[in-house]
Amino acid sequence: MLYHTISECGFENVDLIFALAVRPNITRSEFAAMMTYLLTVVERVAVDEGEARLGMFMFDTVVRALTVIELGEISTRQGLIDRIRGMEQIEPAGNASLLVGLTKLVEMFNNSHVSGGRDMDAVVIIDESTDLGGTDAMLATLNSLNVSLSVAAIGVSQSALQALTSEFPHIDMMPMLNFEVTARFGLTNMFKQPECGK
């Protein structure tokens, strides 16, 4: 579970990847809410201090290459902000597959060359149209890599979430109703605000 600060300290000593499922017929306001949320997080990542690395990508039936930011690819906060602001809305090829997103997460963490002691966290945002099938092997791999996985599930039924987590109770599952409201108020609940320790 993500327990990194969103205080003045920023996210420290962590590799943090966001994977966003993009559903068919996504609206402009929904896409804008995604980008606004990411920008809010970037403002709190200690990238400039070299204490955190942030990556992201969007996926549907495939990973959208133009949306991929590899861990460590951009080493400044302003660089991340500029990259995210420059992203354009994509037209999904079909319903997103969670397997596609998890597979990319495994690839990114395996390629990240983590130095000792750095936490590895991932946030996956899905909705009711996301295909949740065939994910057991990738979930097990992420667990073996000690990746802390949080899934923001928008409009996904409780039964579907229970099926997804029945074998993997370590997943932090966050049922939500609406992304635009959630992006403004709900997703900050992922993060605690411990003392800076300075």
Image (tube, rainbow, N blue to C red):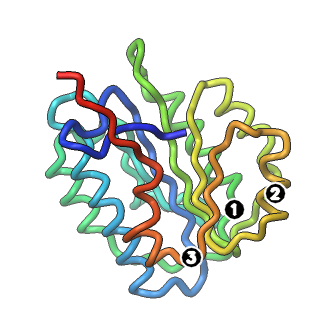
- Asked whether 107 or 197 is in front, the reply is 197
Relative to 177, is 12 above or below?
above
Sequence-wise first label, 1 or 2: 1
Using the image, tell me which numbered label, if any, was put on residue 49. none
Name the side, left or right, on which 173 lies relative to 87.
right
Asked which quadrant contains residue 168, the reply is top right
Describe the element under mark 3 as helix, strand or loop: loop
What amino acid is labelled 2 in the image?
A: Gly
Can you identify the residue that label 1 sits on? 97
Three-letter code for the amino acid on which mark 3 is drawn: Pro
Direction from residue 99 to residue 57 in the image, left or right: left
Mark 1–mark 2 distance (CA, rounded to whole Å): 8 Å
Residue visible at 27% across and 60% down in the picture: 39
Disc 3 packing (10 Å; few <14; some 14–19; many ≥20): some
For the residues bearing labels 3 and 1, Cβ distance under 8 angstroms: no
Residue 42, how many percent across, how many down?
27, 51
**Residue 62 versus residue 141 in the image, above or below:** below
Q: Residue at x 30, y 38 (%)?
A: 11
Residue at the outermost front position: 195
Closer to the camera in the image, 45 or 74: 45
Which residue is tagged 2? 133
What is the count of numbered marks?
3
Residue 92 is labelled as 3
Outermost residue to the top: 116
- Taking the spot 26% from the left edge, 43% from the top edge, the residue there is 45
State the CA–CA distance, disc 2 to disc 3: 19 Å
